[in-house]
Amino acid sequence: MNDDLPRTTSRPLQFASGTAIGTSQRWHRGQYCAILTRAGIVGCGIYDLKTAAEFGQAIAIAKGTPAKPLVEPEDLFEAKIVGVTPQAEALGIRPGMTGREAVEQMLQASPEPN
């Protein structure tokens, strides 16, 4: 295996309201993570809310710091939401919630699978 390649992982994460997919991407001097639900994404600050809103996407973001970056999806559980698209706000997600609370809101709003 080449250690110079970037790394990506994904795994199911269980919540009270259902299951979501957690992802982590890492490369030299960079990283981001997200939790994907049927209704939308809870992710780190790398996501651009304006663009996501233009496409009608429910996105809620949390922000890490250089000293404590958000690297793994579990890092989002206790991180505070700092921004949301109007579509995420319509699901009841607000800044100040934890990432776990935002995921629970998205899971409760998710349509049933086909």
Image: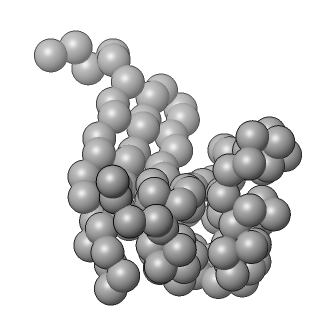
Res. 74 in view: yes
Q: Quadrant of the C terminus?
A: bottom left
Q: Quadrant of the N terminus?
A: top left
Residue 19 at x, y percent in the picture = 30, 68
In the picture, measured across the screen, residue 85 lies left or right of residue 19, that is right
User: What is the basis of the colouring in this image?
Assistant: one colour
**Image vertical order of residue 108 relative to residue 65, above or below:** below
Query: Residue at left 22%, top 14%?
Result: 2
**Image vertical order of residue 45 relative to residue 14, above or below:** above
Res. 63 in view: no
Residue 86 at x, y percent in the picture = 81, 63
Residue 87 at x, y percent in the picture = 74, 62
- Which of 100/40 is in front? 40
- Which of 107/77 is in front? 107
**Image vertical order of residue 54 relative to residue 100, above or below:** above
Q: Kindly indicate the quadrant of the structure image that contains residue 63.
A: bottom right
Residue 9 at x, y percent in the picture = 29, 41
- Which of 28/9 is in front? 9
Query: Residue at left 74%, top 73%?
Result: 90
Query: Residue at left 42%, top 38%?
Result: 25
- Which of 67/30 is in front? 30
Q: Seen from this angle, which residue lies furthest front? A: 114
Query: Residue at left 75%, top 40%?
Result: 55
In the picture, measured across the screen, residue 7 lies left or right of residue 68, that is left
In the rendered picture of this protein, how many numbered marks are placed on residues? 0
Q: Kindly indicate the quadrant of the structure image that contains residue 60.
A: bottom right
